Image (cartoon, helix red, strand yellow):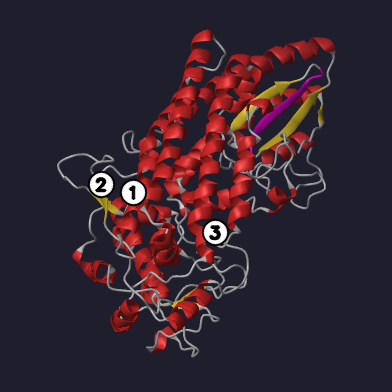
Amino acid sequence: MAKSGSVPSSDLDLLDIDSIYQRAELLSDVDNFTLSPLGHLALTWRGSGQGHGRAPNIGDENVPSHCQPIRCLVADLPAPVRPVDPLVTMVLFSLLPSPPQFFTHFVQLAVSLFHSKTQIRKQLLARRRSPYSYDINQHTGFFPPEPLPKLPPSYEIWEQALRDANGNLSLGEDESEDALERRPYGLEWRARIQEWPVLDTAPLHKNPRLAQRAHLVLAWLVSFYVHSIPPTTSTANTSSGSDSEDRAEPLRVPKSLAVPLMQVSRHLGLAPVLTFADTVLWNWELIHPSRPLSPDNIRFVNTFSGTDDEKNFYYASALAELRGVEILRIIDDFNNLPIGSDLASTTKVSRDLHRLAGIIEDITEIITSVRSACDPHVFYWDIRPWFEGSDAKGPGGPGWIYEGVDEAENLDLSGPSAGQSSVMHALDIFLNIDHKLQERRYPAPSPENKRADHGFMERMRRYMPGQHREFLNVLSTSRSIRQLAQSTPALRDAYDTAVTALKRLRDTHIRIACLYVVTMSRSTPGSRGGCPAAAMIERLHANRLAGKGPVRGTGGNELSILLKAGRDATRRAVLKPSSS
């Protein structure tokens, strides 16, 4: 948005640039300065596009009609907003005096602008934050360097309930002999939770690790609670003492879980539901406590199914995250390089891009290795149902209600997903993968690509810890390696090599998802729990296929369309189409 106004030469003395910046409180947010040959001075700073940083129109009710344009622009500017917001440009004034006056003021403005921009650079350097401020460890990445501590004794009822649930509850829709034997215990376990008091999580907020532990415990308890409820034809309110629910009606999460989970989730900036962080990043302990975290010194603690397959599934995800620590180092090295295209910088960037391609290939192998460690049938029938969120059945599904929480709140209640991996998001941002189809790239998106959920990746960030999401937001505003590769021929092949490796990773992910979800959705759970009766098999199979719609992810998205759209968006980032 641009506004300009002519200013008499007699008023120019009032327009000291430094005082303008100070009045507008823009010193730390001014992005660029432009003085055109015609004398138009433009300041570019960051505004939200929703009223913040907007130039007031002369006809606005809140702008006095007698104000000159320049006075309105300066006096009515709001405080700056976050630097991740879109740029808003305003032309503050035009220099229209005689030529001698013009050159005099031109020199004055140039000196003032140079001084101001120098101050801005100093402030930006001073505000530069270390990875630790985003809860990123240089050795373990998005993993905490040590296991999360247990909660204080006053929250022991939560910890004990989670220990009791592990290995003792069964899926509500499971009607195998083993599951039916566990149902009475599940009924008793849920009844105890309904009688709990609502505990305040505020005392835990001073310690980030305790807050994370509270989220983990409560989120696991919610999933255990909801998914262990058997489907029945009668409908009752859980708060009245019965936990039977008709699947066509919303499932109610008791306030003893819902309220504290909402409280700690707001503090962490994290969705109030089970997430990738709860199942992978925080759900582990050291095999040898005296040694640091490593791929050989980690084991997973909580599982829904009690199977090694589930632990191996989490382990494969952990290996990919830990391998991704080097990706974060490459990104940080690039952003710390001096701006320019000198031979030394170009050589390092090229070398790092080839190294990045190798890391991506390693992660692809890790994803492939899950096939031998986690049986697809066990995953689909015994593990995956526990991951399903409130919207897993699609738009027409029953959903969940959090008791004690304002129903007007639009809660993020999808289940955990690999799409919540901060490492993969950082990689996409670094390589400038356009999942939203906002840029014109070749080849054009297919009709199926256009049908996909283009906001999926951005929405998945709401399921990340707030500090990790903040890191990604800052990374999104950093300089673009794709633009550098476009303008530097020596980098194009190296960039395309990294992007092509990422495209192959997504090809592999599609094949794994097809095997573990799409193919298994057509199978029957006959091997579960020994040998259940044929009628029970048919009934369970019917429950899993309820809705008769497309195969969906745990967050309710049409799986194949979503994954192919991500793969195709990656392919379109290649600079030389023939190399893809």
Nearer to the camera, 568 or 51: 568
Residue at left 45%, top 54%? 269
* Mark 3: secondary structure: helix
Q: Does the segment drawn in magenta span residue 40?
A: yes
Nearer to the camera, 75 or 374: 374
First in residue order: circle 1 vs circle 2: 2
Range of residues picked out in magenta? 38-47
x and y percent of residue 131 in the render? 39, 35
Q: CA distance from mark 1 to mark 2?
A: 8 Å
Q: CA distance from mark 3 to mark 1?
A: 22 Å
* Mark 2: secondary structure: loop
Residue 47 visible? The answer is no
Q: Amino acid at mark 2?
A: Ile
First in residue order: circle 2 vs circle 3: 2
Residue at left 77%, top 19%? 36
Q: Amino acid at mark 1?
A: Tyr
User: Residue tagged by mark 3?
Assistant: 518
Q: Is 180 placed above or below 258 here?
A: below
Residue 402 visible? The answer is yes
- The local crowd at label 1, few if under 14, some if 14 to 19, many if 20 or more residues have their Cα within 10 Å, is many
In the picture, the disc for residue 315 is 1
- The local crowd at label 3, few if under 14, some if 14 to 19, many if 20 or more residues have their Cα within 10 Å, is some
User: Residue tagged by mark 2?
Assistant: 298
The answer to whether the residues at label 1 and label 2 have Cβ atoms under 8 Å apart is: yes
